Amino acid sequence: MELSNAVEKLAALAQESRLTVFRLLVEAGPEGISAGEISEELEIPPPTLSFHLKDLSHAGLISSVREGRSIYYSVNFTGISDLIDYMKKNCCRRSKGGRC
């Protein structure tokens, strides 16, 4: 992962509503949750939610699947794992033992 990609992912999470949506999707697991359910549960108006979902999706943190008239969103666990791996890539490299 490149620095710019990590910054994009972190920036997408650096907003209260988007982080709240992301955490809800983590709780939902791979099955995901519909946009309508997210909107209702978090009390976020649909247009505002759509804006936040677009940012999370663009950053590669979530994905969506259309089922009939509903769109289900779920966490892209590979995307978040890549970010975590990037963040800890050089963990404790400068410590005396070289380990955390």
Image (tube, rainbow, N blue to C red):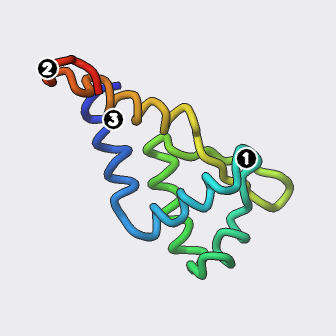
Element under disc 3: helix
Which residue is under mark 1?
65
Q: Residue furthest right?
A: 68
Front-lying residue, 29 or 5 = 29
Residue 14 shown left or right of residue 51 in the figure: left
Q: CA–CA distance between discs 1 and 2?
A: 48 Å
Q: Residue at x 25, y 31 (%)?
A: 3
Task: Give the label, 1 or 2, closer to the camera.
Answer: 2
In x, y percent, where is residue 65? 73, 46
Q: CA–CA distance between discs 3 and 2?
A: 30 Å
Q: Earlier in the sequence, mark 3 or mark 1?
A: 3
Return the mark for residue 21. none
Element under disc 1: strand
Quarter of image, res 93:
top left
Which residue is under mark 2?
96
Which residue is under mark 3?
5
Q: CA–CA distance between discs 3 and 1?
A: 23 Å
Q: Amino acid at mark 3?
A: Asn
Q: Residue at x 68, y 78 (%)?
A: 40
